[in-house]
Image (spheres, grey):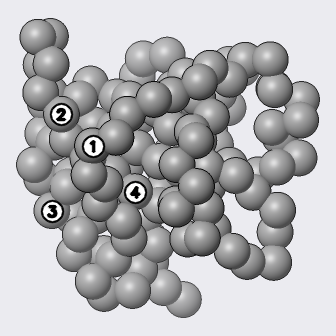
Amino acid sequence: MIEPEYITIIEGPTPEFQSTPEFAINSVLEGPHDSFTAYCELRTANGEAILERCRRAWKEKRPVRLDFPDEMRMRKELDVVGLRLKERDEGTVLQLWVRHPLNEHAAEDDDFDDFDDDDNLSFG
């Protein structure tokens, strides 16, 4: 069994996922299950180390997973399909694009905001 690389949120709120209009990233998501691309930002103190771990995992053909607490504090996991680091006034932010199951999106459709950013992306 291939061991995934994890980006784990230990404490803090549930990530706020947004829908994303980047159509090119959807081709990464082709597979047996219906899904769409969602985007979130996470503050990080060790962004360079996370970025390097993810690049190494993708080079080794291993998946990268986001492990986070949902609103009920239950653990959930989503596949990470792209990431980037960005410097903001408040510090380093890890920008993540994840594979979100389509059946979960239908129930949460009103919670997704539009995202507009045309920076370069890193894909696994």
Amino acid of disc 3: Glu
Please count the marks in the image: 4
Quadrant of the image occupied by residue 3: bottom left
Q: Along the polypeptide, which appears first: circle 3 or circle 4? A: 3
1 and 62: which one is in front? Answer: 62
Question: Mark 3 packing: few (<14 Cα in 10 Å), some, or many (20+)?
Answer: few
User: Disc 4 on helix, strand or loop?
Assistant: strand
Quarter of the image for the N terminus: give it: bottom right
Amino acid of disc 1: Asp
User: Disc 3 on helix, strand or loop?
Assistant: helix
Q: Position of residue 43 (x, y in %)?
A: 26, 24
Q: Which residue is denoted by mark 3 in the rendering?
A: 52
Query: Which residue does the image show at 34% across and 40% down from the upper left?
Result: 118
Query: In whole angstroms, how far apart are the C-alphas of marks 1 and 2?
Result: 10 Å
User: Disc 1 on helix, strand or loop?
Assistant: loop
Task: Tell me whether circle 1 and circle 2 mark residues in contact (CB < 8 Å).
Answer: yes
Residue 24 to residue 114: above or below: below
Q: Which residue is denoted by mark 4 in the rendering?
A: 82
Task: Tell me whether circle 3 and circle 4 mark residues in contact (CB < 8 Å).
Answer: no
Q: Along the polypeptide, which appears first: circle 4 or circle 1? A: 4
Q: Residue furthest top?
A: 90
Q: Position of residue 40 (x, y in %)?
A: 46, 32
Q: Which residue is denoted by mark 1 in the rendering?
A: 119
Q: Which mark is residue 86?
A: 2
Residue 41 to residue 77: above or below: above
User: Disc 2 on helix, strand or loop?
Assistant: strand
